[in-house]
Image (cartoon, rainbow, N blue to C red):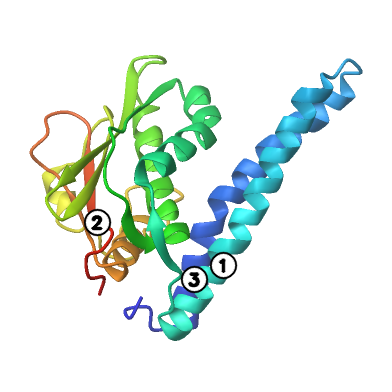
Amino acid sequence: MGRITTAGALGLAVVHQISQPLATIATYTHASRRLLQSGSADRDLVVESMAKAEAEVQRAGLIIERMREFTARGKKSVTAVNLGALAREIAEALGDDARRAGVRLRVAAPPVPSVTADRIQIEQVLVNLVRNAIEAGAALPTGKATVRIMLASRGEEVEVAVEDQGPGIPPEAAASLFEPFETSKANGMGLGLWLSRELVEGNGGRLWYDPGRKGGARFVFRLPRRGQDVL
């Protein structure tokens, strides 16, 4: 976050982070409206859809608050975080996005130690990585792409890897993946990976791209297990 030096850049960062929950809110509210207009709406389905939209509104508010506190004072709300539970929650929350893209979403989360981190910040990192993977998988024929979220214990750290089966990342682009405002997306702002790395490092961890995998892309981050020092 120390590299955000202008109000304009900070504004773009906030827009990037909340655009994702806003898009999900729009999807759920649209679905609810269509169900109600049909005249034969399943009440439980409408309630479920609106509850998901409400949860995304609350998440957007928390993201803004955390970013405001972190950029203003470097403040984090550090707690014990169960990354396995978090990965499953995100997979469920993004399940509709994956299905619309024709992508299978899988979680391999064996029991691992809790980590010490700001849950909202790490949640946003994982959402960024999984959304990127879903978008990459959408380039393949429907039903042929799988996104995997995998957890493992690595000594004093816990590792989370997100893999996709998309077109992969050209070697010439890999060197600048984490640079701000660098993007290959037509409508991208080039802040997702950079901001994700900043948030992981702000919680005492590391985030990197694994270029050794053939086909698709693999991003990995590690965080100190609970009880370890957090910078």
Quarter of the rendering occupied by the N terminus: bottom left
In-front residue for pair 101/41: 41
User: Residue 38: which quarter of the image?
Assistant: top right
Gap in Å between the C-alphas at discs 2 and 3? 23 Å
**Mark 1 crowdedness (10 Å alpha carbons): few <14, some 14-19, many ≥20:** some
Amino acid type, residue under disc 1 in the picture: Ile
Q: Residue at (42%, 63%) from the top-left corner?
A: 79
Q: Residue at (24%, 51%) from the top-left corner?
A: 221
Q: Name the residue under label 1.
A: 64
Please indicate whether residue 177 sits to the left or right of residue 13 in the image. left
User: Residue 115: which quarter of the image?
Assistant: bottom left
Amino acid type, residue under disc 2 in the picture: Arg
| Residue 123 x, y percent position in the rendering | 43, 52
Residue 131: in sight, yes or no?
A: no
Q: Residue at (75%, 24%) from the top-left corner?
A: 45
The answer to whether the residues at label 2 and label 1 have Cβ atoms under 8 Å apart is: no
Q: Earlier in the sequence, mark 2 or mark 1?
A: 1
Amino acid type, residue under disc 3 in the picture: Met
Gap in Å between the C-alphas at discs 2 and 1? 26 Å
Q: Residue 225 carries which label?
A: 2
Q: Name the residue under label 3.
A: 67
Q: Which mark is residue 27?
A: none
Quarter of the rendering occupied by the C terminus: bottom left
**Mark 2 crowdedness (10 Å alpha carbons): few <14, some 14-19, many ≥20:** many
Q: Nearer the viewer, mark 2 or mark 3?
A: 2
Please indicate whether residue 112 sits to the left or right of residue 56 in the image. left
Element under label 3? helix
Q: Earlier in the sequence, mark 2 or mark 3?
A: 3
Eyeballing the image, is 37 above or below 62? above
Gap in Å between the C-alphas at discs 3 and 1? 5 Å
